[in-house]
Image (cartoon, rainbow, N blue to C red):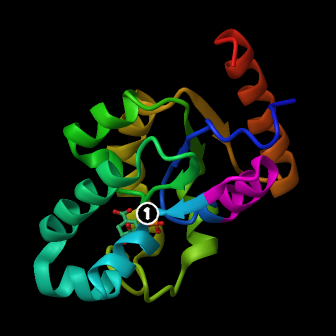
Amino acid sequence: MAKKNSDQLSLILIGLMGSGKSSIGRRLAKHFGISLIDLDDYIVEKAGRTIPDIFAEQGEEGFRDIESGALREVLGKPAVIATGGGVILREENRALLKDHPPVIWLKASPEFLAKRIDGDSNRPLIAAGETLRKLQQLAETRYPLYEQCADFTLPRGDMKKREALQSILLFLAEWQAERGL
Ligand code: S3P
């Protein structure tokens, strides 16, 4: 099992919105005794505005600029870093993620995700009544990008959070052992 209280560990979670990055991230952070940095929360705190407000005032590109800056600031900190679903869109971010392993992709189908996020007004990319269609589009364009960045892919689906955590811990134990950590 991966080491507890690993103050060197910096672990990144990627995946579409609703895939459980924050909640699984919270459990992993607790297991290792390190903090959880939720990149969206970090951005909201720094900008003093909500994500929908940033999108409304500066557009998606404005949000992506802030997101890339925030990613640079938090990478390498001893923490579990739960990123926003679109962090892999920019090539510079993908290169940064590749330089900061391990990166874990929580891979979930659009159908699974739609049930979890339908009607969430805090997600500006999802218009009311179009959740599944939009998630299908996002999955099509983003799955290959998540795949490029991931050192480990965890298929979500019916898996309980406890099982998901165990599976990630097993991967991490091997990953650390291979590197003598
Ligand atoms: C986004 C996902 C959101 C947030 C923003 C854009 C995306 O984060 O960063 O609304 O492009 O998929 P979560 O994945 O944490 O919901």
Tell me if I can see residue 12 in this picture: yes
- Residue furthest to the front in view is 7
Q: Which residues are magenta?
A: 23-35
Q: Is residue 65 left or right of residue 142?
A: left
Q: Is residue 3 above or below residue 47?
A: above
Give the image quadrant in which the ligand numbered 1 is located.
bottom left
Using the image, determine if residue 89 lies above or below residue 136. Answer: above
Q: Which residue is found at the position 37% from the left and 79% from the top?
A: 44
Q: Amino acid at mark 1?
A: Leu
Q: Quadrant of residue 55?
A: bottom left
Question: Callout 1: few (<14), some (14-19), or many (20+) C-alpha neighbours within 10 Å?
Answer: some
> In the depicted view, which residue is nearer to us: 144 or 95?
95
Quadrant in which residue 166 is drawn:
top right
Residue 136 falls within the magenta-colored stretch: no
Label 1, secondary structure: give it: helix
Residue closer to the observer: 14 or 133? 14
| x and y percentages locating residue 93 in the rendered image | 28, 42
Query: Residue 19, can we see it?
Result: no
Quarter of the image with the N terminus in it: top right
Location of the C terminus (image quadrant): top right
Q: Which residue is at a point 45% across and 74% down the rendered structure image? A: 41
Q: Nearer the viewer, residue 177 or 164?
A: 177
Residue 35, position as x, y percentages in the image: 63, 59
- Dot 1 corresponds to which residue? 39
Vertical side of 53 occupied by 73: above or below: above
